[in-house]
Image (cartoon, helix red, strand yellow):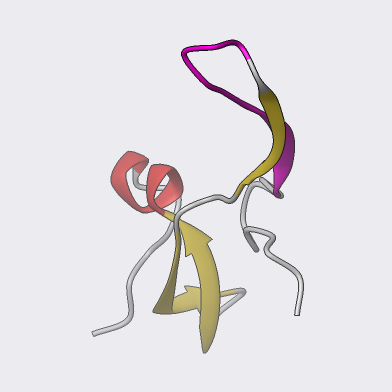
Amino acid sequence: MANVCDVCGKKSMTGCNVSHAHNKTKKVFKPNLQKVRAVDNGSVRNLKVCTRCIRSGAVKKAV
């Protein structure tokens, strides 16, 4: 299953861990996704949404 936000499309990105000796190893930075019951086009769905979208109010939580 893909690590992609259902609202903004934020997904995993790659980079490097850099040690004190400047050794580099590959690293994957994953978005902080949460499962949320939210209203989507008038219906309630379970969405995987990043915390940035939840905090900014881009998602209307279902009550």
Residue 33 x %, y %: 48, 62
Q: Which residues are magenta?
A: 12-22
Image coordinates for residue 37, horizontal then vertical, percent = 40, 83
Q: Work out whether residue 24 can be spotted.
A: yes
Identify the residue at horizontal 45%, vertical 54% (top origin).
32
Please tell me which residue is depicted at 75% across the width and 80% down the height of the picture.
Answer: 1
Residue 40 relative to residue 34: left or right: right
Residue situated in front as seen by the camera: 7 or 15: 15
> Residue at left 47%, top 76%?
39
In the image shown, does 19 or 30 lie closer to the viewer?
19
The relative height of residue 63 versus residue 22 in the rendered view (above or below) is below
Farthest residue, direction left: 63
Q: Is residue 43 visible?
A: no
| Residue drawn 46% across the image and 13% down it | 20
- Whether residue 21 is situated above or below residue 24 in the rendered picture: above
Find out whether residue 33 is within the magenta segment: no
Question: Left or right: 9 with respect to 52?
Answer: right
Q: Toward the viewer: 19 or 46? A: 19
Residue 35 appears at what percent x and percent y?
44, 78
- Classify 1 as above or below 9: below
